[in-house]
Amino acid sequence: MTVREILLLGNPLLLKPCEAVGEDELDQAQQVAQDLHDTLADFHARCGWGRGMAAPQIGVLKRMVCLQVDRPLTLLNPEFSEPSEDMQILWDDCMSFPDLLVQVRRHKRLRLTYRDLDWAVHSLHLDGAMAELLQHEVDHLEGILAVMRAVDGRAFALRSQAAHLGAAMMANPA
Ligand SMILES: [Zn+2]
């Protein structure tokens, strides 16, 4: 088990676009996936939230995301298609700035295509919390952070003030 340091807002590595994982890199990807899952599980145990982590958050500039929703899942080279015109505005959070909440606009539904650690292709239709979560994680792979998606200058709150933000926020923590 390797719990890695989570890079925090201000670290320039979080702003760099990531490279695709190649089929010849699956051994390294397996190791990175294990570290991501360990680091995510450690964060969740300490802080009580957190469902997904992108490789650049531990300083690996590869297109990889790990999720822990119902079960552990590793996504290589995830790509979206068919984004809905319907959008939703929600309060988002991030393990790279754990004390901050940011109001962002996301597609309500889209299709996600990715490869797994056996290089098999999968395609999922996403909506609700999964659509929101994956848009956040795939943004990380482009060097885009939720703070860069803020809907306006009032779209920021400290987590300690979440009670002021209403039921919508608490229904859907990232
Ligand atoms: Zn994040």
Image: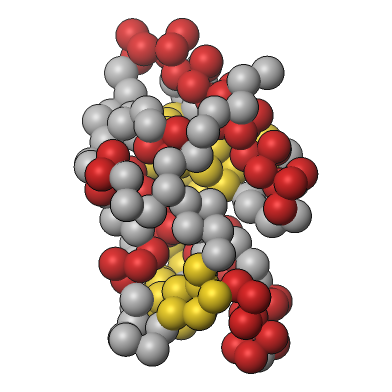
Would residue 66 appear left or right of 162 to someone viewing this image?
left
Percent of width and height locating residue 79: 34, 46
Residue depicted at x 63% and y 50%: 51
Would residue 49 appear left or right of 36 to someone viewing this image?
right
Foreground: 125 or 25?
Answer: 25
Quadrant for the N terminus, please. top right
Quadrant for the C terminus, please. bottom right
Percent of width and height locating residue 159: 60, 72
Foreground: 104 or 110?
Answer: 104
Percent of width and height locating residue 170: 69, 77
Would residue 23 appear left or right of 52 to someone viewing this image?
left
Q: Quadrant of residue 164?
A: bottom right
Residue depicted at x 64% and y 80%: 162
Would residue 56 appear left or right of 116 to someone viewing this image?
left
Q: Quadrant of residue 63?
A: top left
Residue depicted at x 25% and y 30%: 19
**What color scheme is it?**
secondary structure
Residue depicted at x 55% and y 37%: 66
Q: How many marks?
A: 0
Percent of width and height locating residue 98: 55, 58
With respect to residue 108, does 43 lie above or below?
A: above
With respect to residue 26, does 10 lie above or below?
A: below
Asked if residue 173 shows in the view, the reply is yes
Asked if residue 142 shows in the view, the reply is no
